[in-house]
Image (cartoon, rainbow, N blue to C red):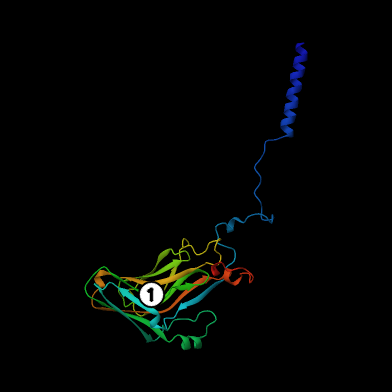
């Protein structure tokens, strides 16, 4: 009897060992390789999109001083606008524009004259009569400025397509002569939404100068020319011609 029990137990052990060899523990699936056409490319994860069509576009050349308005606190001073003939000597044409077209359609710059009443922590704005729409997805924004070597700070106020306001720092004005100031549009600015494919980009609301209190005396002059943006036009240039426009409602 004991011998029979031992034989049965031995048979069970052999069978369980064979079963363990026949069915090994599950292993994690190997990562997909580049040879697998359906494999995700880790180097592209987090990238906005695979294709871009970057182009520098001119948003305003400040040719019409009547299109712009200026404002500051009346208790701090007065501001007036005027256009002047001239242009930065180092300015280059945008893509597709010739030097002859620049001379023909870009004769003026916009000047602002600020008369301070007293030293103060103040600011002034120069705004278009309507917001300036930037096509596509803006990456950078630039503007030519004569800063007159003061420690004031220049900002550009923008709105996204959903009305959210942002303040883009362009830099200080402590330089002489013309200088091109350029700033990146932060990626947290919401310029597109998959539910509103027809609504993209940003709108430029105004130029804002925050003054240094030590410099707010006498008369201050500042000049602007050629507001530009480098923008991604891939979506605009590749939209299906039969696609409906959501903003037409």
Q: Position of residue 221 (x, y in %)?
A: 31, 79
| Residue positioned 43% across, 87% down in the render | 107
Which quadrant of the figure has residue 70? bottom left
Which quadrant of the figure has residue 226? bottom left
Q: Position of residue 23 (x, y in %)?
A: 72, 34
Residue 146 in sight: no
Please count the marks in the image: 1
Q: In the drawing, does residue 151 fall left or right of residue 141?
A: left
Specify the quadrant that holds the N terminus. Answer: top right
Residue 23 in sight: yes
Which quadrant of the figure has residue 88? bottom left
Q: In the drawing, does residue 76 fall left or right of residue 137?
A: left
Q: Which residue is outermost to the front?
A: 249
Q: Mark 1 packing: few (<14 Cα in 10 Å), some, or many (20+)? A: many
Q: Nearer the viewer, residue 198 or 237?
A: 198
Q: Which residue is outermost to the left?
A: 118
Q: Position of residue 229 (x, y in %)?
A: 48, 73
Q: Is residue 90 above or below residue 6?
A: below
Q: Is residue 2 above or below residue 10?
A: above
Q: Nearer the viewer, residue 28 or 141?
A: 141
| Residue positioned 77% across, 13% down in the render | 3
Specify the quadrant that holds the C terminus. Answer: bottom right
Give the structural element (helix, strand or loop) at label 1.
strand
| Residue positioned 75% across, 20% down in the render | 10
Q: Nearer the viewer, residue 34 or 82?
A: 82
Q: Position of residue 48 (x, y in %)?
A: 55, 61
What residue did someone put label 1 on?
A: 127
């Amino acid at each position: 009897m004991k011998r029979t029990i031992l034989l049965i137990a031995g048979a069970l052990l052999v069978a369980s060992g064979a079963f363990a060899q026949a069915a090994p523990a599950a292993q994690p699936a190997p990562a997909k390789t580049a040879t697998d056409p359906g494999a995700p490319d880790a180097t592209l994860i987090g990238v906005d999109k695979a294709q871009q069509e970057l182009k520098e576009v001119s948003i305003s050349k400040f040719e019409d001083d009547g299109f712009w308005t200026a404002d500051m606190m009346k208790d701090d001073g007065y501001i007036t606008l005027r256009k002047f003939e001239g242009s930065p000597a180092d300015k280059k044409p945008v893509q597709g524009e010739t030097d002859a077209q620049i001379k023909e359609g870009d004769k003026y710059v916009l000047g602002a004259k600020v008369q301070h009443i007293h030293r103060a922590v103040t600011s002034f704005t120069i705004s278009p009569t309507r917001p300036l729409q930037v096509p596509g997805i803006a990456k950078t924004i630039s503007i030519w400025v004569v800063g007159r070597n003061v420690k004031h700070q220049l900002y550009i106020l923008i709105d996204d397509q959903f009305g959210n306001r942002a303040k883009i720092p362009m830099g200080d004005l402590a330089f002489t002569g013309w200088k091109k100031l350029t700033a990146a549009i932060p990626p947290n600015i919401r310029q597109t939404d998959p539910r509103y494919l027809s609504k993209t980009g940003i709108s430029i609301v105004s130029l804002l100068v925050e003054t240094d209190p030590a410099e707010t005396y006498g008369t201050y002059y500042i000049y602007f020319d050629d507001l530009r943006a480098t923008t991604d036009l891939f979506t605009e240039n590749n939209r299906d011609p039969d696609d409906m426009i959501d903003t037409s409602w």
